[in-house]
Amino acid sequence: MKPIRFAIVIFAATALVGVAQAQSSYSCVNEVPNPYKQVTGWAHMERPWAPTNNVFVDGKDNVWVMDRCEDKGCLGSHEAPIWELSPDGKALKNFGAGMFLFPHTVKPDAEGNVWAIDGDAKEGKGNQVFKLSPDGKVLMTLGKAGQGGKDPDVFDRPTGIAFARNGDIFISEGHAPTFGNSRIAKFDKNGKFIKSFGHLGSGDGELKGPHVLAFDSQGRLFVADRSNSRVAIFDQDGKFIAAWKQFGRPSGIFIDKNDMLYVSDSESEDAPGKDTNNPGCKRGIRGGSVKDGKAQFYIPPPPVSDPKLPPPEGVAADSHGTIYAAAVQAKDVYKYVRK
């Protein structure tokens, strides 16, 4: 019986690979229900939002946001860009003043420490990833201030971060418009460099402007491969698994404890020759299970004061399915609850 069981395992594994490959050819899904409604005026803060592309919800359903201090940015600003808010919008923490040039991502780890990414370099500052205590004390720094390049100890416009269950740290780099290394750097929990994978391109295993990272319950790494208009999936050794286009052009991705994938598409347009060209795909937020890769819902862009303002880039969801979405140009963090 053992050879038969072994054959069944091989067949099942092969079938799963086939499903993943088939999912890579799905077209962008627009015609699915919208089971959400927007909640306005939910956040109660001492100052208005500055531009923000990032939002994250932790295990307590608290909402983490990193904005860019002021309209002019964080360089020379006295404002703090890192926010923790309760589900009812009360500001619980605000720290990080004077640390950042181009705030891009904030995400707490399983131990409650807070990781924050400074995604650009200027005047000897930026291109770094900081590990902070819950009250904002610097515990670890990755990258060299104001420096870039291809070496393991520097970043080229870092963007997103995710943590494996064993504590390994994965960081994406290569923000548009230059795209730089367009790779994923892997470190152990102590910040020791392990390896990098991916490089600039549009083939299997290649990336173009990876923007956000997230793990599912199987430990697969999902990458918002934005300028390739797809969600790319890798194992933790960097082996390419699949690429999904059905969720649109991903600026933000989030995977909840039920393996529901949320994707925000802030850039898709029918614009031949432009980097944002993704014809036939509407901007907005899509969601679906990572188990089958099927898009189950679509939320259209929220109303804005100027029709030229793009919809949100960042997206996250709490344990009840409430969705938060962060918009750069509109300078807002939107909240959606189920109808």
Image: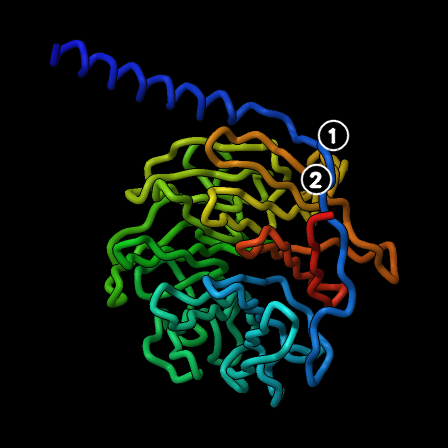
The residue labelled by disc 2 is 298
Secondary structure, mark 2, is strand
Question: Does 291 appear above or below 325?
Answer: above
Q: Earlier in the sequence, mark 2 or mark 1?
A: 1
x 49%, y 55%: residue: 174
Quarter of image, res 12: top left
Question: Does 15 appear above or below 270?
Answer: above
x 53%, y 50%: residue: 254
* Cα distance in 3D space between marks 2 and 1: 8 Å
Quarter of image, res 115: bottom left
Residue flagged by tag 2: what amino acid is it? Answer: Tyr
**Horizontal placement of 133 versus 193: left or right?**
right
Residue flagged by tag 1: what amino acid is it? Answer: Glu
Q: Are marks 2 and 1 in contact (CB under 8 Å)?
A: yes
The x, y position of residue 38, in whole percent, is: 76, 55
The x, y position of residue 220, in whole percent, is: 37, 41
Which is nearer the eye, 176 or 83? Answer: 83
x 57%, y 71%: residue: 66
Question: Does 76 appear above or below 55?
Answer: below
Give the position of the N terminus as an image quadrant. Answer: top left
Other residues around mark 1 within 10 Å, as few (<14) / some (14–19) / many (≥20): few
Secondary structure, mark 1, is loop
**Horizontal placement of 119 versus 36: left or right?**
left
Which is nearer the eye, 22 or 146? Answer: 22
Give the number of the disc on residue 31. Answer: 1
x 67%, y 45%: residue: 285
